[in-house]
Image (spheres, grey):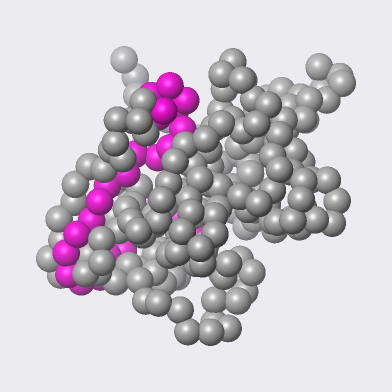
């Protein structure tokens, strides 16, 4: 796996497609299709069509039940597409027949040849809420966002724990579960507001952002 987070994107020639216009804007070279977060287009040059992307009935059902997974659009055409999300920092990953798990709120764009699905964190029941994430596998580009400068943690060094909303993405090779502190009243999590964290063990990385992310503003009824 190669990533702007690891600092190894320039170590060898990679297929064209995704590039950082700057730290907060992604540039996508079409004609290849791209799947992107709805509302993330800020500009484009050329001729492009934008369509809603549901991902099939099974994924639509998972989204409805879990609340996980960003609403996606499929972009087709010729030219340059520019994507951003609330001026959050953008980080690129190039997968090489491997996988990454992403918090749906942090998923900006990925190439359509990659497979994706919504999966539950092991040990987290439906009542736990918010512990479903999007797993992307295959070969191609993925772009994720972080609210602030993130920290990259090596889970192989020691057992690693993170708040469920602060954990942006991690290796699919990791064993992931739920850790609950003994003291129920210990409000230690940034996003969950409760004494429960994601627990990571094994060979792989965890990318953690500086907060639980930008607040979600709900429309007034």
Is 158 on the left-hand or right-hand side of 86?
Answer: right
Q: Is residue 73 magenta?
A: yes
Quadrant for the C terminus in the image: top left
Residue 50 versus residue 131 in the image, above or below? below
Q: Residue furthest left?
A: 47
* Residue at figure coordinates x 22%, y 42% from the top left: 52
* Residue at figure coordinates x 51%, y 63% from the top left: 97
* Residue stretch in magenta: 62-90
Residue 115 versus residue 7 in the image, above or below? above
Q: Position of residue 53 (x, y in %)?
A: 26, 43
Is 62 on the left-hand or right-hand side of 75?
Answer: right
Residue placed most toward the observer, 117 or 76: 117
Quadrant for the N terminus in the image: bottom right
* Residue at figure coordinates x 29%, y 30% from the top left: 57
Residue placed most toward the observer, 186 or 107: 107
Q: Position of residue 67 (x, y in %)?
A: 44, 27
Q: Position of residue 114 (x, y in %)?
A: 40, 56
Q: Position of residue 202 (x, y in %)?
A: 76, 50
Residue placed most toward the observer, 51 or 117: 117
Residue 108 in view of the camera: yes
Q: How many marks?
A: 0
Is 164 on the left-hand or right-hand side of 57?
Answer: right
Q: On the image, which quarter does residue 48 sit in?
A: bottom left
């Amino acid at each position: 796996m190669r990533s702007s987070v690891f600092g190894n994107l320039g170590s060898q020639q990679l297929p064209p497609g995704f590039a950082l216009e700057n730290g907060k804007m992604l540039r996508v070279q079409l004609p290849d299709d791209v799947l992107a977060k709805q509302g993330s287009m800020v500009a484009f040059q050329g001729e492009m069509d934008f369509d809603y992307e549901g991902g099939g009935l099974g994924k639509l059902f998972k989204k409805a039940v879990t609340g996980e997974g960003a609403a996606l659009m499929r972009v087709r055409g010729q030219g340059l597409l520019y994507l951003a999300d609330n001026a959050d920092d953008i980080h690129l990953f190039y997968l090489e027949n491997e996988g990454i798990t992403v918090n749906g709120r942090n998923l900006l764009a990925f190439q359509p040849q990659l497979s994706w699905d919504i999966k539950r964190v092991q040990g987290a029941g439906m009542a736990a809420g918010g512990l479903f994430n999007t797993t992307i596998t295959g070969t191609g580009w993925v772009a994720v966002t972080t609210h602030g400068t993130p920290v990259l943690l090596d889970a192989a060094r020691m057992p690693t724990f993170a708040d469920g909303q602060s954990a942006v993405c991690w290796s699919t090779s990791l064993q992931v579960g739920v850790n609950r502190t003994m003291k129920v009243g210990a409000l230690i999590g940034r996003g969950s507001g409760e004494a429960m964290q994601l627990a990571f063990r094994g060979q792989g990385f965890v990318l953690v952002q500086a907060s639980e992310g930008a607040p979600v503003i709900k429309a007034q009824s």
